[in-house]
Amino acid sequence: MSQLILTTLPNVPLVQPGDDLVRLVLTGLERARLELEDNDVIVIASKILSKAQARIVRLADVTPGQYALELYAETGKDARVIELMLRESSEIVRARRGLIVTRHNLGFVSANAGIDHSNVEQGASDFVLLLPLDPDADAQVIRERIQAETGKRVAIVIADTHGRPHRIGTMGIAIGSAGLPALEDWRGRKDLFGYELKSTDIALADLLASAATLLLGQADEGTPLVHVRGATWSGPDGTARDLVRPKEMDLFP
């Protein structure tokens, strides 16, 4: 019988710039009375990683450029936030009244370059939170430190919430991962009737991020760390960048 067990790590304090996330994870595991095992997964909300890295911006310190002002006239969104979107992105994919979709510097396409007003202690109207600069590298560092301190080979997923093309509502996706194949290749496997799979790729890191997001929450839950046990995979380790569809393969640019 297969089983997947997800557990929030309790009593995580509000993260401040410079905080040690590894220490928060290990302390949370102790409070939850969980002993790590090989192939456990720790899912970390991207927001606390951004906070620890001081990716908080005071909007009063942002001066919009000409292009940001033009997009403000087109969309009605805060020109200072638009300026940050431009800095965080390689391309504006779509813009209309009330909405801007960008291709983030990390490669994925999302609304508002992942810039967030919610759960910023300094004040949502005056401060915003940017995504981490390199969440794949951050996941690897966290993984290596946890292994050094515990001796256990764990995987790390950095989760953020995104909307999806052609679907309503947000869900969790992986913007960083280490210790597992973020994209698992199932080609060559057989189905129940012996048919060989020809083109099946499984977005493993996204699936784990989405499952954990049911517990991470979006409002006042205060549970930014989730322990996952029972996930299985095969194949070499990858990164969340493996999940980004190359622009030349995008049928809906």
Image (cartoon, helix red, strand yellow):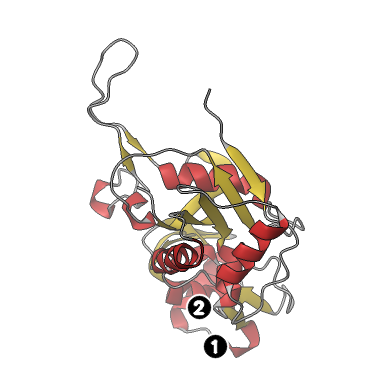
Amino acid type of the residue that numbered disc 1 sits on in the rendered structure: Thr
57 left or right of 251 in image: right
Residue at image position (56%, 31%) is 3
Residue at image position (52%, 48%) is 209
Q: Are marks 2 and 1 in contact (CB under 8 Å)?
A: yes
Q: CA distance from mark 2 to mark 1?
A: 7 Å
Amino acid type of the residue that numbered disc 2 sits on in the rendered structure: Glu
Q: Residue furthest top?
A: 193
Secondary element under disc 2, as helix, strand or loop, is helix
**In-front residue for pair 88/160:** 160
Residue under pointer 2: 83
Q: Position of residue 185 (x, y in %)?
A: 29, 38
**In-front residue for pair 151/139:** 151
Q: Position of residue 34 (x, y in %)?
A: 64, 51
**In-front residue for pair 12/87:** 12
Q: Is residue 195 visible?
A: yes
Residue under pointer 1: 63
Residue at image position (56%, 72%) is 50
Secondary element under disc 1, as helix, strand or loop, is loop
Q: Quadrant of residue 5?
A: top right
Residue neighbourhood size for the residue with mark 1, other residues' Cα within 10 Å, grouped as few (<14), some (14–19), many (≥20): few
Residue neighbourhood size for the residue with mark 2, other residues' Cα within 10 Å, grouped as few (<14), some (14–19), many (≥20): many
Residue at image position (54%, 72%) is 130
2 or 1: tag closer to the N-terminus:
1
**In-front residue for pair 73/207:** 207
